[in-house]
């Protein structure tokens, strides 16, 4: 390949996103804190399950405790992946060669820099919202006895140490709120860098026929220097495309398992929230807490969908870029390589986590329709009763 590689992490224009979603968790102290939080919530989950089995919690009471109970499973899964699974963005530049952001001209460089800033600003703002939402869960409310089973457990079972235990337990939600958005940030980081590299790649593809010598177009077919240049560039295009495919398949396979697991946790959380709202017992003092939480969750979800769709759209644009190349001046060998590249770019490149679903607008619309259907059912049930 004749492309200059970018220096990582020095020139990583998304290093802010990488820091809060990956680098910070490489420190031993942070890992120790995460492990302690995981143990706390595993213990809390076991205690809650035991209370259900011995009927210390009735079905009606669990309707109120369910959202926190299932929400903690989402957070525990996130911590488990951080501690015990491979971080697929920790060495992104080692798995995919990063072409220099300045290799495709000033216009593309400006576009990449602008989009990097937008992503970084979003990540910081959303991170602040996550911290605020987490702090609101740390702040004691009278209704917490009815919504956090462990608060009830501490007050009823160990009243002498209740205040210390409640404070310690509440403080873990600052970490839980943080880790619940970490993997979305990792996907955003990986997809945006993938998109940037595709933008650089497509600019390279556009210049396949760019020839320095002044020669008539009709003579290009017989010009050996031109044909050698085209052969070299087309070969580089095929090699680069294969690098993309290899990276895509490897990381999609790793991500798909965890996306399914997170989806399952999200479904359980959604169902528990559905029954909680259906109960009709919603405390006014929790409105602000819930509003900030839902706003943050919606913001994170939208960014997750947009990140996947932006990568998919760039890849889809590849076919039209290649099809506009003036290939009729190519030699027979170069034509074969060109058509091979054209066929390769006809194949869709999506972040698929099942045979049916990918991270794109279609997935977002499907989820929104599902939420709308659930809300419609809830409203009908409420009015009928």
Image (cartoon, rainbow, N blue to C red):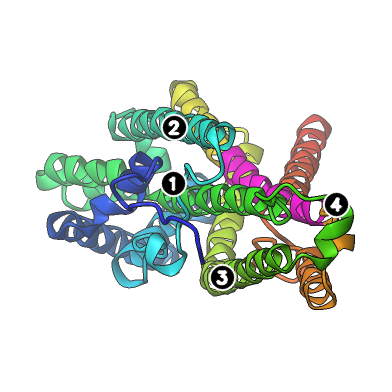
Residue at the limit of the structure toward the left, as seen here:
160
As measured in the structure, the alpha-carbon distance from the residue carrying label 3 to the one carrying label 4 is 33 Å
Looking at marks 4 and 2 on the same chain, the residue that comes earlier in the sequence is marked by 2
Considering the numbered disc 1 on the image, is that residue within a helix, a strand or a loop? Answer: helix
Q: Position of residue 201 (x, y in %)?
A: 61, 54
As measured in the structure, the alpha-carbon distance from the residue carrying label 4 to the one carrying label 2 is 54 Å
Tag on residue 243? 3
How packed mark 4 is, by other alpha carbons closer than 10 Å (few <14, some 14-19, many 20 or more), is few
Q: Position of residue 147 (x, y in %)?
A: 42, 41
**Against 358, is 109 above or below?**
above
As drawn, is 361 to the left or to the right of 174? right
Q: Tell me if residue 178 is in the magenta stretch.
A: no
Q: Nearer the viewer, residue 238 or 287?
A: 238
How packed mark 3 is, by other alpha carbons closer than 10 Å (few <14, some 14-19, many 20 or more), is some
As measured in the structure, the alpha-carbon distance from the residue carrying label 3 to the one carrying label 2 is 32 Å
Which residue in the protein does label 1 denote? 181
Which residue in the protein does label 2 denote? 126
Which residue in the protein does label 4 denote? 217
Cβ–Cβ below 8 Å for labels 2 and 1? yes
Considering the numbered disc 3 on the image, is that residue within a helix, a strand or a loop? Answer: helix
Instruction: Say which of marks 3 and 2 sits in front.
Output: 3
As measured in the structure, the alpha-carbon distance from the residue carrying label 3 to the one carrying label 1 is 29 Å
């Amino acid at each position: 390949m004749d492309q200059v590689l970018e220096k990582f992490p020095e020139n990583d224009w998304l290093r802010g996103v990488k820091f809060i979603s990956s680098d910070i968790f490489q420190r031993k102290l942070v890992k120790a804190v995460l492990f302690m939080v995981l143990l706390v919530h595993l213990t809390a989950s076991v205690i809650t399950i035991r209370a259900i089995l011995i009927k210390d919690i009735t079905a009606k009471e669990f309707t109120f405790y369910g959202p926190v109970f299932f929400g903690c499973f989402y957070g525990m899964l996130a911590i488990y992946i951080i501690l015990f699974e491979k971080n697929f963005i920790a060495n992104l530049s080692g798995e995919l060669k990063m072409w220099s952001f300045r290799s495709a001209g000033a216009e593309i460089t400006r576009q990449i820099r602008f989009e990097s800033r937008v992503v970084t600003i979003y990540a910081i703002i959303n991170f602040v919202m996550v911290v605020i939402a987490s702090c609101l869960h740390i702040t004691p409310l009278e209704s917490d006895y009815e919504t956090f089973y462990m608060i009830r457990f501490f007050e009823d079972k160990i009243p002498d140490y209740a205040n210390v235990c409640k404070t310690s337990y509440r403080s873990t939600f600052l970490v839980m709120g943080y880790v619940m958005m970490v993997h979305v940030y990792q996907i955003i980081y990986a997809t945006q860098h993938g998109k940037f590299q595709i933008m650089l790649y497509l600019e390279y593809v556009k210049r396949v026929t760019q020839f320095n010598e002044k020669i008539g177009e009709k003579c290009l077919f017989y010009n050996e220097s031109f044909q050698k240049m085209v052969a070299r560039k087309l070969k580089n295009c095929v090699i680069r495309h294969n690098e993309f495919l290899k990276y895509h398949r490897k990381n999609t396979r790793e991500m798909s398992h965890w996306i399914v697991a997170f989806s399952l946790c999200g479904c359980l959380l959604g169902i528990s929230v559905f029954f909680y709202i259906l109960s009709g017992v919603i405390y006014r003092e929790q409105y602000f807490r819930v509003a900030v939480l839902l706003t943050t969750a919606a913001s994170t979800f939208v960014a997750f969908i947009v990140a996947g769709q932006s990568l998919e759209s760039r890849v889809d644009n590849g076919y039209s870029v290649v099809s506009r190349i003036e290939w009729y001046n190519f030699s027979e060998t170069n034509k074969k390589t060109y058509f091979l590249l054209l066929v390769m770019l006809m194949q869709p490149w999506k972040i698929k986590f099942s045979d049916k679903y990918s991270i794109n607008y279609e997935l977002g619309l499907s989820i929104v329709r599902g939420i709308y259907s659930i809300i419609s059912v809830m409203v009908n049930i409420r009015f009928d009763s």
